[in-house]
Image (spheres, rainbow, N blue to C red):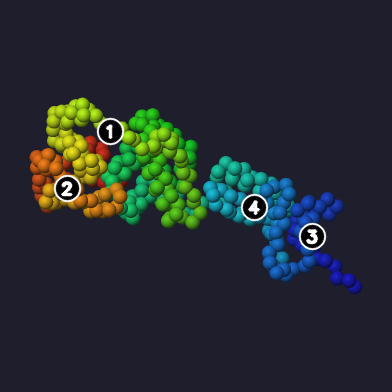
């Protein structure tokens, strides 16, 4: 008696109670094959829905799958139900709708409540060294934490971060909004790369355009320098002295604002690489005018070193304690 071909699970799932129903095109494709085992997995792609198809393993196990791409990464979902091809295709349409809306359909792993943005920033700073850490902390403290600090980081989306960026740009300025965007993206990408397996940070764009990023070639005129110098004389210590030293040395703001007496040696400023943006030690000979200004700054007292400028920034940006804690 000739051997009869055994119906596969896919055929059984398709026919159900109506054996006379026309074959689904996807099932018809899968019938044109020998019996298992196979040398490799077999794939039969659906002509109606991109990414959807039937997978048959080497030993004959069959499952409906959906391949997709989201946030630059590929993923695969397996139909969890026990229905036929029509039910699986309807499920795949629902998953595709989430993917088009930029929502990862896979279930989140772990507890989001333990990973608020504030806690992630605190952990991030434990593993990164910043020459301008104080400004980095102040940026989050002043502009980001009041709105998003207690939110789980994986619940943040582009819409709310874009709203925050636009609000900062309107209230403070576009360059401040650019700093907010850059800091959020740095922390978010670090978290996605080092603390999760599947999370992708929804990066947002900077508000600055190409013209804003172009280098500036304007320098202050003599009359402008004269007016600034006179105003600094009226301001006095510490802010007036700070601006005068900046004019005389062309250093970055924090390099002088956080300068200690121990970093002025034999008429030169000697900064370690941790205090310099370029990551290289800085040795800068000082003019007599700059030395005379630094002499007017009171020496630090106590056992801990004290900056020469004695808290030259507003308290909200340069407090003695960490703003992240």
* Residue at figure coordinates x 28%, y 46% from the top left: 132
Judging depth in this view, the residue of 252 and 75 nearest the camera is: 252
Label 2: which residue? 285
Q: Position of residue 88 (x, y in %)?
A: 69, 51
User: Is residue 164 visible in the rendered structure shown here?
Assistant: no
Q: Is residue 225 left or right of residue 125?
A: left
* Residue at figure coordinates x 75%, y 61% from the top left: 9
First reached walking from the N terminus: tag 3 or tag 2: 3
Q: Position of residue 31 (x, y in %)?
A: 79, 60
Q: Quadrant of residue 256?
A: top left
- What distance separates the C-alpha of mark 3 from that of mark 4? 20 Å
Judging depth in this view, the residue of 195 and 116 nearest the camera is: 195
First reached walking from the N terminus: tag 2 or tag 4: 4
Local SS, label 2: strand
Q: Position of residue 34 (x, y in %)?
A: 78, 66
Give the label on residue 66, or none: 4
First reached walking from the N terminus: tag 2 or tag 1: 1
Label 3: which residue? 31
């Amino acid at each position: 008696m000739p051997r009869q071909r055994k119906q596969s699970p896919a055929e059984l799932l398709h026919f159900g109670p109506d054996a006379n129903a026309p074959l689904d095109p996807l099932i018809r494709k899968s019938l044109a094959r020998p019996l298992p085992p196979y040398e490799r997995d077999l794939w039969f792609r659906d002509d109606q829905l991109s990414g959807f198809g039937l997978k048959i393993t080497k030993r004959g196990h069959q499952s409906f799958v959906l391949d997709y791409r989201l946030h630059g990464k590929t993923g695969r979902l397996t139909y969890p139900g026990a229905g036929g091809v029509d039910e699986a295709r309807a499920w795949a349409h629902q998953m595709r709708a989430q993917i088009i809306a930029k929502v990862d359909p896979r279930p989140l792993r772990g507890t989001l409540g333990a990973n608020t943005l504030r806690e992630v920033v605190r952990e991030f700073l434990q593993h990164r060294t910043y020459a301008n850490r104080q400004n980095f902390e102040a940026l989050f403290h002043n502009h980001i934490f009041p709105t998003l600090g207690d939110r789980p980081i994986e619940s943040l989306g582009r819409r709310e971060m874009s709203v925050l960026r636009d609000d900062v740009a309107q209230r403070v300025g576009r360059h401040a909004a650019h700093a907010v965007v850059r800091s959020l993206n740095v922390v978010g990408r670090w978290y996605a790369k080092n603390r999760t397996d599947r999370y992708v940070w929804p990066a947002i764009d900077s508000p600055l355009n190409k013209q804003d990023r172009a280098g500036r070639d304007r320098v202050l005129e003599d009359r402008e320098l004269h007016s600034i110098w006179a105003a600094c004389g009226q301001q006095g210590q510490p802010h007036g002295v700070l601006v005068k030293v900046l004019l005389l040395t062309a250093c970055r703001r924090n390099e002088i604002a956080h300068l200690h007496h121990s970093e002025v040696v034999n008429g030169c400023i000697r900064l370690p690489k941790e205090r310099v943006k370029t990551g290289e030690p800085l040795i800068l000979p000082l003019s007599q005018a700059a030395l005379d200004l630094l002499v007017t700054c009171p020496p630090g007292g106590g056992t801990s070193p004290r900056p020469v400028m004695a808290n030259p920034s507003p308290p909200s940006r340069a407090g003695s304690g960490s703003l992240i804690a």
